Image (cartoon, rainbow, N blue to C red):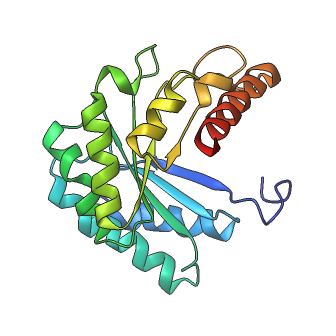
Amino acid sequence: MREIVPRDIRLSVAIGDAENFPGKYSHRAVEAAKAGADIVKVGLLGFEEPDDTAPFLAEIRRSLDVSGFGSALLVAGLYADKADRSFISRFPVIVSSCGVYAALIDTYGKGGSTVRDFLSSREISDFARHCREAGILSVLAGGLGNRDAGRLADAGIDIAGFRSAVAGDGRGNIGIDAEKLKILYGTFDTLKAAVSS
């Protein structure tokens, strides 16, 4: 992918849904950065205790730094359909102390539910606010559609993932439908025009 994607476009690589084995995922993170990843994303599926995430993420950050890939941005992800509510509310503060660039909330299950089935509008706004206060970016994904664009902007979410909205044949499938992508771009163009007017 790095050979295809121009260097001025950031390339994001997911290194898996982590269990608490820092060495294993530190190695994956360094290998991803070595291959050309600008952003290294790790899911925290195997973590039940919020306080276990800080040393795990700090070790990945340290490994990137000492290996000469300090410019690689680290993104930590939680799953709204798996994580405890108190974990989600504390998540931005916990990860901000570990050199993390952004906190991501996604959904683990890909069977039709969306992140909005698990988090209320208030919880999404609170997540965005907590990330801002902690000095990191907020990222939301998980079955988002065109109709969610305005809501996310209102909530203050910095980055949103719209894979299912542009996938060729539904969520999780390979291939982008050019027409769906055009419609999504149009949604954002409409939002920009509304903001600037």
Horizontally, is 95 left or right of 173 in the view?
Answer: left
Figure quadrant of residue 113: top left
User: Percent from the top left, x then y, of residue 123?
Assistant: 25, 36
User: Percent from the top left, x then y, of residue 26?
Assistant: 44, 67
Taking depth in this image into account, of 172 and 18 the one nearest to the observer is: 172
- Farthest-out residue, front: 197
Taking depth in this image into account, of 175 and 182 the one nearest to the observer is: 182
User: Percent from the top left, x then y, of residue 36?
Assistant: 70, 65
Count of numbered badges drawn on the protein: 0
Horizontally, is 94 left or right of 181 in the view?
Answer: left
Horizontally, is 101 left or right of 162 in the view?
Answer: left
Figure quadrant of residue 23: bottom left
Residue displayed at 73% across by 23% down? 183
Residue displayed at 67% across by 31% down? 190
Which quadrant does the C terminus fall into? top right
Residue displayed at 62% across by 15% down? 170
Asked if residue 175 can be seen in this view, the reply is no
User: Percent from the top left, x then y, of residue 45?
Assistant: 32, 42
Horizontally, is 172 left or right of 64 in the view?
Answer: right
Residue displayed at 35% across by 73% down? 59
Asked if residue 25 can be seen in this view, the reply is yes
Q: Relative to 71, is 153 above or below?
A: above
